[in-house]
Image (cartoon, rainbow, N blue to C red):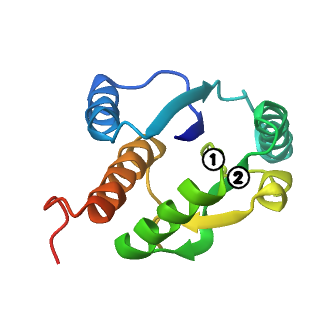
Amino acid sequence: MLKIDIFAIGNRLPSWVSEGVEEYTRRLPANINLKWNQFRLQSKEGKKNTVIAREKQGERFLAAIPVGSKVIALDEGGDAWSSKSLANTLSNWIFDSEYICILIGGPDGLSPKCLERADQIWSLAPITLPHFLVRIILVEQLYRACSINLGHPYHRE
């Protein structure tokens, strides 16, 4: 069984986000145990405090990562994976890792320490996505990768 912990910044999710995330999480196969961990957004005022808030959020993420986890950071500067390459990566994670921890930063991104800790840095798209949408896109892509690996017709060529 592959355990995936997703760490995300955000205070309150709109119901449409919760519903989308729950729908795709429910569709995942039984050998994927996906758990969402929500961290409160640090308050900030001014440019200097933005950096401090991002660093504090990063420290909380790093402290919560289970020992032995492979860490995947979502960042616009990361590698773009096709759905098929994500399916291959997911297969590798299942065989190589017991725990995967995926980090979704806040509006100002992840701290440099989180990016340094990451084993892989993944970009969902070359565009900036709203943080709420990232959650739905991420879990949908995980479901799509599982579908590809299982030969399910959800993914069309």
Q: Is 110 on the left-hand or right-hand side of 102? A: right
Closer-to-camera residue (80/128): 80
Q: Position of residue 156 (x, y in %)?
A: 15, 71
Q: Position of residue 57 (x, y in %)?
A: 77, 36
> Residue drawn 58% across and 75% down?
79
Q: In this view, does 105 lie above or below 128?
A: above
Q: Mark 1 points at which residue?
A: 100
> Residue drawn 32% across and 50% down?
143
Q: In this view, does 6 lie above or below 149?
A: above
Q: Can residue 11 be seen in this view?
A: yes
Count residues near mark 2 (Cα–Cα under 10 Å), then give few for <14, some for 14-19, many for 20+.
Answer: many
Q: Quadrant of the C terminus?
A: bottom left
Q: Is 42 on the left-hand or right-hand side of 81? A: right
Count residues near mark 1 (Cα–Cα under 10 Å), then give few for <14, some for 14-19, many for 20+.
Answer: many
Q: Mark 2 points at which residue?
A: 71
Q: What element carries label 2?
A: strand
Q: Can residue 104 be seen in this view?
A: no
Q: What residue type is labelled 2?
A: Val
Quadrant assignment, res 83: bottom left
Closer-to-camera residue (114/65): 65
> Residue drawn 13% across and 62% down?
153
Q: Position of residue 142 (x, y in %)?
A: 39, 53
Q: What element carries label 1?
A: strand
Q: Are marks 2 and 1 in contact (CB under 8 Å)?
A: yes
Closer-to-camera residue (96/154): 96
Q: Which amino acid does label 1 sit on?
A: Ile
Q: In this view, does 140 lie above or below 8?
A: below
> Residue drawn 26% across and 38% down?
27
Q: In this view, does 144 lie above or below 64?
A: below
Q: Earlier in the sequence, mark 2 or mark 1?
A: 2
Q: Residue 5 carries which label?
A: none
Disc 2 versus disc 1: distance between alpha carbons?
6 Å
